[in-house]
Amino acid sequence: MEIIIQPTLEAATAIAARLVAALLREKPRAVLGLATGSTPLLLYRELVQMKLNWRRATTFNLDEYVSLAPDHPASYHSFMRENLFRHVNLRAKNIHIPDGRARDIPALCERYEKEIHKAGGIDLQLLGIGSDGHIGFNEPSSSLASRTRMKTLTERTLRDNARFFGGAARSPHHVITMGIGTIMEARHCLLLAFGSKKARAIAGAVEGPVTAMNPASVLQLHPRATLFLDEAAAARLKMKRYYRWVFENKPAWQKF
Ligand code: PGA
């Protein structure tokens, strides 16, 4: 794991944006795994401002709420349209987000996995982290080998996301999410975490045991996982000084 701690979310996001931009320039046909939520908002804004060429790129989103229509303002279809897709030249046929209204959810999940495979696999997977350690919507106790499937959200996640629905009671309890096994097949995982609410989950993910009780801890087993943190999210890391030292002494030739 490479742990990059920056003073602010703006500074961390700026480096992450450069990394995504470099991939799109080096590999115009890149396959990107995309995340939603508050965390990547600034990243998407920066990527839009960079005026990159997305024409040949392909995207797969991590998750979507079951039952929400794509035009529901809290759906991840809407989130992506508003924050990225309508501002860049991605082709509609290359955009993939699970359809929360699918009648046959297991069939949809199987198809989603096949589409990722057919696209050549994900080059770079963007991830946020839940305050309970979830990645995608793989809540604690999710199998570390899981594939795309339906999951039930924890009460904590419902509370965390209540702001998008005008209250936890109005939020869908079920979601479709890429599995942890699916995420682990991405060639590079890039996780962003900002704010003190994420500090405990980050400490467990980076310095705790690999456990389904903190799904992000599985990234310890990934050959190429980069974590971008602000000071608040890094606050509970015991080896903070070492991670900073590594980053400051990173040779210029070494890629992320
Ligand atoms: P957030 O959510 O970016 O809104 O904090 C992160 C997540 O649940 O993965």
Image (spheres, helix red, strand yellow):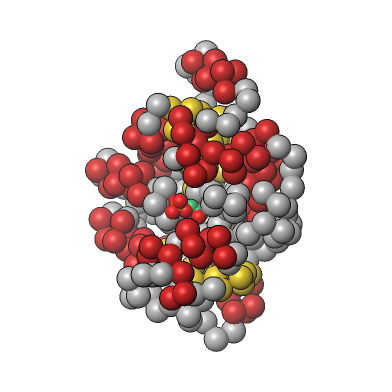
In the shown orientation, is residue 8 left or right of residue 160? Answer: left
Residue 77 in view? no
Residue 64, position in %: x, y?
A: 49, 68
Image position of 16 with respect to 150: above or below? above
Residue drawn at x 44%, y 40% is 195
Compared across the picture, whether 151 is left or right of 94 comes to: right
Q: Residue 158: in sight, yes or no?
A: yes
- Is 237 located above or below residue 193 in the figure? above
Quadrant of the image for the N terminus? top right
Q: Quadrant of residue 245?
A: top right
Residue 176 vs residue 238, the one in the foreground: 238
Residue 18 percent across, percent down from the top left: 38, 34
Tell me the residue at 43%/56% (across/down). 36
Write the residue at 52% across / 30% down: 235
Residue 248 falls left or right of residue 240: left
Residue 133 drawn at (x, y percent): 60, 49
Figure disc tally: 0
Could you tell me residue 57's position as x and y percent? 41, 53
